[in-house]
Image (cartoon, grey):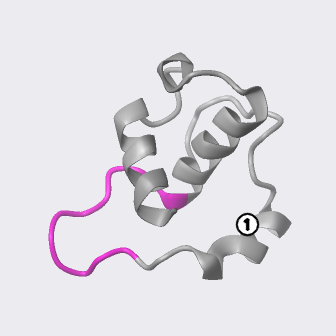
Amino acid sequence: MSSRRGYPSDLSDARRDLVKDLLPEPSADGRPENHPRREIVNAILYLVRSDCPRRYLPADLPLQQTVYWYFARWE
């Protein structure tokens, strides 16, 4: 578990269980991921819920470029 503060938009454990099968599996080849999938989803939900630009993501969430890359890939 990370030491970052929680946000109201974060996934609860019950909601994470509902969406975990919808996310693609990490690739077995290539470099390992730097951020857990849950943190990426939390950052996307933060942006959607707060309706703020990507550059306003709090520093304790993954970088805006990383979040956008996953969002565009999963869309």
Q: Secondary structure at mark 1?
A: helix
Q: Is residue 43 above or below residue 21?
A: above
- Residues 70 and 18: in front is 70
Would you say residue 29 sits in the magenta stretch?
yes
* Identity of the residue furthest to the left in this view: 30
Q: Is residue 8 above or below residue 58?
A: below
Q: Position of residue 19 (x, y in %)?
A: 70, 72
Q: Is residue 17 left or right of residue 44?
A: right
Residue interval drawn in magenta: 26-37
Q: Quadrant of residue 7?
A: top right
Taken as a whole, is the magenta stretch helix, strand or loop? loop
Q: Residues within 10 Å of mark 1 (few under 14, many from 20)?
A: some
- Residues 53 and 10: in front is 53
Would you say residue 12 sits in the magenta stretch?
no
The residue carrying mark 1 is 16
Q: Quadrant of residue 2?
A: top right
* Identity of the residue furthest to the top in this view: 56
